[in-house]
Amino acid sequence: MTISQRYQLSLTLLTDMYQLTMAQGYWKKGLAEQEAVFHLYFRKNPFKGGYTVCAGLADALDLLQNFKFTEGDLTYLKALTGSQGQPLFEEGFLQHLRDLTFTCDVDAIPEGTVVFPNEPLLRIKGPILQCQLLETPLLTILNFQTLVATKAARVVEAAQGDPVLEFGMRRAQGPDGALSAARAAFIGGVAATSNVLAGQLFNIPVKGTHAHSWVMSFEEEQESFAAYAEVFPHDSVFLVDTYHTLEGIQKAIEVAREMRKNGAELKGIRLDSGDLAYLSIEGRRMLDEAGFSQVAILASNDLDEYLIESLKLQGAKIDTWGIGTKLVTAYDQPALGGVYKLAALRQPNGEWEYKVKLSEQLAKISTPGILQVRRFSKEGALVGDMIYSEPLGISPAVTMVHPNDPTQRKNFTQECVHEDLLVPVFKAGEQVYTSPDLRAIQQRTKEQLQLLHGTYRRFLNPHLYKVGLEEQLHEKKLALIVQLRTTAQTKGA
Amino acid sequence: MTISQRYQLSLTLLTDMYQLTMAQGYWKKGLAEQEAVFHLYFRKNPFKGGYTVCAGLADALDLLQNFKFTEGDLTYLKALTGSQGQPLFEEGFLQHLRDLTFTCDVDAIPEGTVVFPNEPLLRIKGPILQCQLLETPLLTILNFQTLVATKAARVVEAAQGDPVLEFGMRRAQGPDGALSAARAAFIGGVAATSNVLAGQLFNIPVKGTHAHSWVMSFEEEQESFAAYAEVFPHDSVFLVDTYHTLEGIQKAIEVAREMRKNGAELKGIRLDSGDLAYLSIEGRRMLDEAGFSQVAILASNDLDEYLIESLKLQGAKIDTWGIGTKLVTAYDQPALGGVYKLAALRQPNGEWEYKVKLSEQLAKISTPGILQVRRFSKEGALVGDMIYSEPLGISPAVTMVHPNDPTQRKNFTQECVHEDLLVPVFKAGEQVYTSPDLRAIQQRTKEQLQLLHGTYRRFLNPHLYKVGLEEQLHEKKLALIVQLRTTAQTKGA
């Protein structure tokens, strides 16, 4: 279920106020229909990592598909006043919004694709007024889901094939924070969620057994396990740390013996506190010695990729990982700094004028053009991504330049195969792309990560994947920057 | 607009799977109607701070008010299967859910109240099956809004009376993350949001002017300012850092001169990059020298309470603060670790049995009872909060014991006035409390913070506000812990 289906209100006002004031500005100056190109991209991989997994496109497309101002939206805008008590928006502008339909071309990188800094995840081409209004919601959706899908991929990587379960709803940033996180975490590779509504809406497997309160609501811990086993003979995972963990494991074993007499097998035990390395090793030993080597050990308690890696190194005997807070909030970096920048503007003569946003830091200067990303691979491994501008094309040398260090260049040889990452998703306001099923997106993530050498996937000081600007684009960008700076200096003198 | 009004789907499945499996367990064991008491509380103030501002109650109440399984919910649950492919939920249980109506008593601390670790923000008393199902959504809503309201209060504190604007939507954790954050930030004291939908839904003032793209879409920066001023003569704030900030300020001044000729005044300029201390001081000087001392300086760019404090110390001339990512994601601690613990269970004989969850750390052992928080004040300042159990009452000595160090005690004298913080919000499933208007809640936050001495409000090593357990409750808790540990040891030996 997509985002506009979840809400019973128009999401067209889900944008920043300045998008609307600028929109009135463009309308008033007769510029509303001026054709523009904007790109949505981020500047750094999250979590000091070597890659990013993009996600959220299905929700973004849904938002574009339903872009329409309702009378309720317009009534609200009409009532807004400026500092003199005057209406902020003019009738003519509100009528323009009433008549507005989405007419842009949109190209995007499919969800589950491995992406890198400075690559446009989405490109929108159309009337500047429309492009502008859509900036904020597109960023909100793609920033967050991309962030969580990436975190999930890292956690799954650390788990080395063990199932990872997403348990974070209670600590998520609001109900929709939980739902969006569950969707994105699944794209990143988790096996299931504890969030039942997410399970229903997105057709994700749901998992969960019992809490401490179940144990506490019985006089004896063992009695609580036996009661649970009676209700779920084939699906019981006992939480063993309510009072004393090793004691709890012993009681779980007693109940497992009773279950076996009745032809049922305990599925697992769960550790949710204490020293997970020690307790899982001891627990494994106790279970094995009692003849319950099939009983899995599930661990949770503020885990993330670093703790999983550490527990694995310590020889912890954990089979399934329950990850909550650290995954659904992307705790160590709770926002992806995605931006949305104007890159070209059609002039009255039909020519595209390239646009850059200056900054004192070279890395923060936007790239002009109508961009596409060409990805080169060799023998099933990714070797580099070239950002090029479609009208400029690619020079015969197939050379790219490091975005922040023009002395570094790379050529792609004939042996490389290539693919362009951005695919058309809207043409003239008509959706031309159908989002794959969520499982297919999860599968894509898995395949994409396999194309990436392990050195890019490690957590500490990952190898830097090569992304550059096609040399003509580089030259064009450089010329524009110099020209803008020269103008500023001349005028400033 | 409350949360269930925002969504067009039943939010009853917005819970963790284990709540439903436990619910079937309680039902199957004939325990579904057993009366229980759960408390929702957190263990540490967020951001290493000295206080917390509670928020989210209106959304939580709305969720309880609309607690009802729909046929769609039940159809989904019916289709879920266990590891043997068998249906996970029985027909009789699903019928029980179909017939279920909310019948609990709920007491809660009103939004905008200053609260401290271990104090129940919400207490729910009723059939254990109902209490359990509601755990996850109550935590999701109250954890996040409380976190953001607290962060906002800190930012507002740092701004020392300057208006703070919430600008974070694009970096929020999903659309509802942005909406919930806007609501909570307003409770914490921000003056306005950039999120238009939040403005509409919650009746929060909305603010915003223009982006870099507006400037870039004109040939000249000055032309872009003039165009904006033409459209919004009385509400223009120019973003001056698209190319070169001091140049941009000079152009803003030129346009402000033209505006003045036409009887309009520039409202402000906005700095969004670079050294905000230097640029604001220079900008202020330039504006003042040009006769524009009324023009405000608005600053943004990854600001939080620490940067505001630092900028103030440096003498930055900033009048209005735009806070985005760091506020809406509560960046330095993106989750409040709120928990929801069983504290008492009614026995067949009608007596309440007190319940604790053990832990190796004393601070993580839950407090049993049917808890209330009594807050003592003296001469308009808060002096301490006593957590007591209603059935036990308060001993004549009015003594409380430090929750983690029983050697520390505090008596409250006759000079103190007191108030009980938890108020009834539902009685036997009927809502008996009407949430105040959001502005009234914001006002409450402001008043509450004024009751708190500055030493509790500072960011670095704040003074620890005294919260203790009433002495009879302390004794009861101690006895229970010792009893449980003794039982464990005896059996473990």
Image: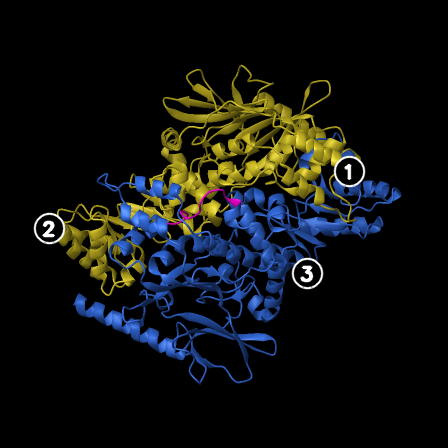
Chain colours: A yellow, B blue
Query: Mark 3 or mark 1, which has the lower sequence index?
Result: 3
Q: Chain of mark 3?
A: B
Q: Chain of mark 1?
A: B
Magenta includes A291? no
Image-based side of A490 in relation to B120, left or right: right
User: In this rendering, is residue A47 above or below B416?
Assistant: above
Residue occupying image coordinates x 62% and y 36%:
A70
User: What residue is pinned by disc 2?
Assistant: A261
* Residue B231: mark in rendering: 1
Indicate the amino acid at tag 1.
Val
Which of the image's four quarters has the N terminus of chain A? top left
User: What residue is pinned by disc 3?
Assistant: B161
Report the mark closest to the observer, 3 or 1.
Answer: 1
Q: Position of residue B242 (x, y in %)?
A: 69, 38
Q: Chain of mark 2?
A: A
Q: Secondary structure at mark 2?
A: helix
Mark pair 3, 1: CA separation = 30 Å
Residue occupying image coordinates x 18% and y 70%:
B490
Indicate the amino acid at tag 3.
Gly
